[in-house]
Amino acid sequence: MKKLPQTINIMLKVWRQQGSESKGRFEDIPVKSVSVHMSFIELLDTVNEQLTIEGRDPIAFDNDCREGICGMCGAVVDGRAHGPEKATTLCQLHMRKFSDGDTIVVEPFRARAFKLVKDLVVDRSALDKIIQAGGYISVNTGGAPDANALPISQEMADKAMDAAACIGCGACVAACPSASAMLFVSAKISQLALLPQGRPEAAKRAGGMVRAMDSCGFGNCSNHRECENTCPKEISIVNIARMNREFFKARFVSEA
Ligand code: SF4
Ligand code: FES
């Protein structure tokens, strides 16, 4: 059996930009002897060590848990948000996905609603504003009920759980030609609308979150399905259909 190389040499073509008002450019950084067992975030750490030793400005990038659960990491690698591996966040992408001699192009998530902060860091607080507009339950539910007091079918529990897997990374926005946040918003609306605790405020929630999404400058869904294809948590666009139904119900209720 052919033995795979344990290290590779690559050329990193990384986007450098001091701030949203400055002009950006790609910088070529050759990186030698990259362990194929490194994650992409560890590669950026290694490059930053090299840049710091050389007295150069390290690359700014977001990350936190490095376990694919917090939604903080994210960059477009070779034209794909979170990189070439399906259903994988940038922090879980490993260098074994690349080959010796590759040129790897790294850019920030680009969208009107995501203002560039520096290099690969963009401001995704617009997603927080959408959550503030209704992505919660505010009715008083009292103390914890008995486990079987509120029966929920397995099917509904599974669907709600699938929607709740969204980590709010914003890759769906970066992948969408219209920079739409509908996959994110629909996942957040669905995880609550599918459970009895979320039903009392479902209409108000859908109306508020969709209005916040529009006012933050996100585009509309154009049915390209790039969001679903790129999402590291494989959130389904079925949620967008559910969100639209909830939104129309909200309009009907307010007009009534
Ligand atoms: S729907 Fe997927 S891509 Fe979009 S924010 Fe949630 S986890 Fe990220
Ligand atoms: S750093 Fe938390 S999901 Fe990547």
Image: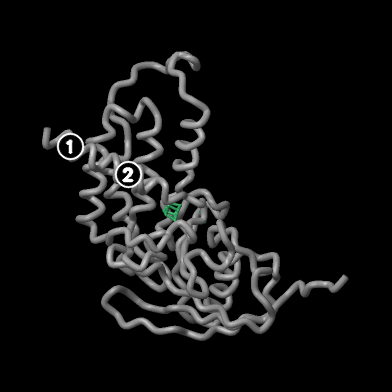
Dot 2 crowding, Cα within 10 Å, few <14, some 14–19, many 20+: many
Q: Is residue 167 above or below residue 95?
A: above
Residue type marked 2: Met
Tell me residue 136's x, y (percent): 32, 36
Residue type marked 1: Phe
Q: Is residue 25 left or right of residue 162?
A: left
**Residue sitting at the far left:** 255
Identify residue for label 2.
243
Q: Which of the 4 quarters of the picture holds residue 122?
A: bottom left
- Of the numbered discs in the image, which one, if any, rests on residue 252? 1
Tally of marks: 2
Q: Is residue 117 left or right of residue 102?
A: left
The residue depicted at 40 percent of the width and 58 percent of the height is 170
67 and 174: which is toward the camera: 174
Earlier sequence position, callout 2 versus callout 1: 2
The residue depicted at 27 percent of the width and 61 percent of the height is 219
